[in-house]
Image (spheres, rainbow, N blue to C red):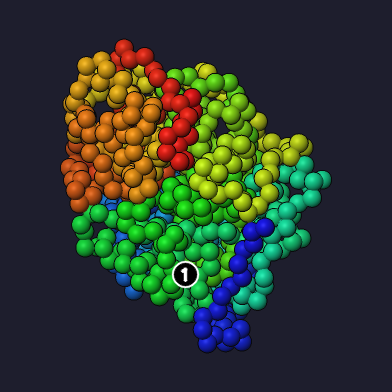
């Protein structure tokens, strides 16, 4: 049975020589009488330009820190670009206003949803600190879970108070008590008690942030041998699949697994991208001293800032490269540019398996739920904390179940299913819950499940997961992995679901999402009537770069060729999800009458590019000009919804099947077979 490896000391290092907490780390925590200060400032309100008098809802981390500013050219200048880019497009004078004393950001509901980029809270905090001020973020109902945890880690004050948001007006004087978390609008003589934190969240907040917490726990984590113990059948009956995995991975074996509880859980894999690695490296160095242990459960994939030809991006990726060399991190745990996007690459390499806990510094790490693992998005500091201790803190969410029943309609893929779910869930989305999917009639191959779980980032869920079944085990068997590390589990019979729903597969049609959210989805045949024009078509990459995804599109193109459509009318580019997929699509496939996927694409003038995470960001060989329209098959949501618009790309967000609009073509369902790992259903 698989076990999580204990810490490995560097040569010459002994337990008694490990760095410990600093005197400041052991100082009395806020809230125990050590501090009696108030933070004061004026309101900086982010208004909704479309609705007079309304604060803006659903501000995502792409708007807080555009992707082009998520760059660090060295560990010594980590946050320079993050500060400069804060609200660059949404509020160009943000920095100046903060320096004038407008330090209380007031926003609507669902603030800071989207990606795991910790550059956002770090940049906001840094903008205030460079003027000797402290920032307080006040929002209404719901805040992005990853952003909120990142804020605690960094010491950025965040408050959820719908009443305070409604009352606040430009120029209002506000105060915040860090001890009690009580907020006051001094101008309007109102006081507010915000949405409470869990006890552990409050402890982390009061403890001085994640660096201090990590230094206090570091030595004990090295001394303790990890142990994975699965629940007995009686206990398992009341636990979901995710809860059973959390139960087994508890650091503190007496900790209760229930919604709202914050627990420490061991991690099987802690992956970063080239974009999120630098801050995680900084955190690891701050906690461990940098050269006391080998990073624990580490993996790094270069899949964001690659193939751009920009000097700043080269410096960004060089930080992770140097760290990998220092600590001897090699393939498959270190993926070089072109190896693939880590949501595809790490499962291909066998590093993602059922029953694992995989906190990844990318919001789309939820994709690992397709393989029966817990995949959650975390910030870079949480990841660096995990590299140091072997575990992370997690707050157990409420459970939600979605049962897929019936048979898929022709041409419907995993992307269509998740767009339909997001459409149905509306603005509330999954409400931060853990979503358990049930493929009741075994209709969904791993590629479809990957897309569905991946896009639980856009659904604002904690995670999405399919309990392992015969489709799961067949996928691993096809890749030569017959010995899985953990028992194959399923949700217990006595689980009390907060929400229990079903989706009839036969009712779902091919879907297209319009701006500016993947949940703004409509049937593709309705959108086709709008006769949308575009400059470039993109298929791939984060949620649509698997062999099965590209096969689905190739089948449409082949059917179109049979109807006399010979060449793509516009520039057409595909991005395979990994180097392995790029090799697979060159092999003949019987479902294409012996042609390869690549041949079908080339026949209509399409070109394949190297794997990278965001296809709507420019590559060296992929210039994107402002004002151009693209038709992407990647979702423009948690990982780049607003960024895509700033790069001049799409006016229509991700489609379920990018090349779907071939009129009069009878759908042809892909059949089983093809290269290893291919699982397009018959």
**Residue drawn at x 79%, y 46% as measured from the top left:** 233
Residue 395, compared with residue 439, is above or below; it is below
Q: Count the numbered circles shown.
A: 1
Foreground: 116 or 678? Answer: 678
Quarter of the image for residue 399 reads top right
Q: Looking at the image, which is closer to me, 418 or 180?
A: 418
Foreground residue among 162 and 333:
333
Q: Residue furthest right?
A: 234
Evaluate whether residue 277 shows in this view: yes
Can you give x and y, in whole percent of width and height, for residue 446 in the image? 51, 38
- The location of residue 165, given as percent across then percent down, is 49, 45
Task: Indicate the position of residue 237 as horizontal and vertical percent values.
Answer: 77, 42
Q: Secondary structure at mark 1?
A: helix
Instruction: Please state if 442 lies on the left or on the right of 655 as rendered.
Output: right
Q: Is residue 191 left or right of residue 63?
A: right
Residue at 76% over, 51% down: 231
Identity of the residue drawn at 38% across and 48% down: 580
- Residue labelled with disc 1: 283
- Which residue lies at the image location 39% right of the left edge and 34% below the top edge? 549
Quarter location, residue 594: top left
């Amino acid at each position: 049975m698989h076990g999580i490896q204990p810490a490995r000391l560097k040569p010459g290092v002994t337990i008694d020589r490990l760095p410990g907490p600093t005197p400041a780390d052991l100082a009395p925590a806020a809230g125990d009488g050590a501090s009696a200060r108030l933070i004061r400032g004026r309101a900086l309100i982010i208004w909704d330009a479309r609705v007079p008098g309304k604060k803006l809802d659903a501000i995502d981390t792409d708007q807080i820190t555009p992707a082009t500013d998520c760059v660090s050219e060295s560990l010594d200048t980590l946050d320079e670009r993050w500060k400069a880019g804060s609200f660059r497009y949404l509020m160009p004078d943000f920095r100046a206003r903060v320096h004038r004393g407008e330090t209380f950001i007031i926003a609507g509901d669902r603030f800071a949803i989207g990606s795991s980029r910790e550059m956002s809270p770090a940049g906001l905090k840094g903008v205030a600190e460079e003027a000797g001020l402290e920032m307080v973020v006040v929002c209404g109902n719901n805040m992005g879970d990853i952003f909120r945890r990142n804020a605690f880690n960094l010491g950025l004050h965040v408050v959820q108070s719908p009443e305070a948001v409604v009352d606040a007006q430009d120029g209002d004087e506000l105060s915040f008590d860090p001890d009690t978390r009580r907020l006051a609008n001094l101008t309007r003589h109102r006081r507010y008690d915000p949405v409470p934190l869990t006890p552990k969240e409050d402890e982390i907040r009061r403890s001085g942030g994640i660096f201090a917490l990590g230094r206090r726990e570091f030595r004990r984590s090295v001394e303790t041998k990890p142990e994975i113990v699965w629940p007995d059948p009686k206990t398992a009956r009341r636990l979901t699949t995710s809860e059973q995995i959390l139960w087994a991975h508890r650091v503190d074996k007496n900790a209760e697994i229930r919604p709202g509880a914050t627990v420490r859980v061991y991690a099987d894999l802690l992956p970063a991208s080239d974009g999120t690695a630098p801050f995680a490296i900084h955190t690891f160095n701050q906690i461990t001293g940098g050269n006391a242990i080998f990073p624990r459960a580490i993996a790094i994939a270069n899949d964001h800032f690659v193939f751009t030809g920009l000097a700043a991006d080269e410096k960004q990726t060089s930080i992770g490269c140097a760290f990998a060399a220092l600590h001897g991190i090699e393939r498959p745990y270190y993926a070089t540019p072109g190896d693939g996007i880590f949501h595809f690459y790490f499962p291909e390499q066998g590093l993602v398996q059922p029953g694992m806990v995989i906190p990844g510094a990318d919001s789309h790490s939820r994709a690992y739920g397709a393989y029966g693992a817990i995949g959650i998005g975390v910030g870079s500091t949480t990841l660096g904390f995990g590299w140091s201790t072997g575990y992370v803190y997690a707050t157990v969410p409420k459970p939600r179940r979605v049962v897929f029943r019936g048979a898929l309609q022709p041409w419907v893929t995993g992307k269509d299913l998740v767009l339909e779910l997001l459409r149905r869930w509306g603005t509330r989305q999954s409400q931060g819950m853990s979503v358990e999917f049930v493929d009741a009639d075994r209709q969904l191959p791993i590629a479809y499940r990957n897309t569905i779980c991946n896009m639980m980032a856009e659904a604002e869920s904690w995670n999405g997961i399919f309990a392992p079944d015969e489709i799961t085990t067949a996928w691993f068997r096809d890749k030569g992995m017959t010995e899985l590390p953990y028992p194959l589990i399923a949700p217990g019979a006595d689980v009390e679901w907060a929400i229990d729903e079903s989706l009839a597969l036969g009712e779902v049609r091919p879907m297209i999402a319009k701006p500016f959210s993947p949940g703004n989805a409509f049937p593709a045949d309705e959108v086709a009537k709008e006769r949308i024009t575009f400059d470039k078509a993109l298929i791939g990459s984060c949620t649509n770069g698997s062999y099965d995804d590209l096969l689905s599109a190739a089948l449409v193109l082949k059917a179109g060729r049979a109807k006399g459509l010979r060449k793509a009318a516009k520039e057409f580019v595909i991005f395979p999800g990994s180097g392995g997929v790029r090799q697979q699509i060159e092999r003949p496939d019987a479902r294409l009458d012996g042609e390869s996927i690549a041949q079908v694409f080339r026949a209509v003038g399409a070109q394949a590019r190297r794997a990278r995470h965001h296809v709507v960001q420019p590559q060296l060989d992929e210039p994107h000009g402002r004002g151009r329209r693209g038709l992407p098959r990647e979702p423009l949501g948690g990982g780049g919804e607003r960024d895509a618009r700033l790069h001049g790309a799409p006016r229509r967000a991700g489609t379920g099947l990018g090349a779907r609009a071939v009129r009069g073509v009878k759908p042809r369902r892909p059949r089983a077979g093809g290269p290893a790992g291919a699982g397009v259903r018959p």
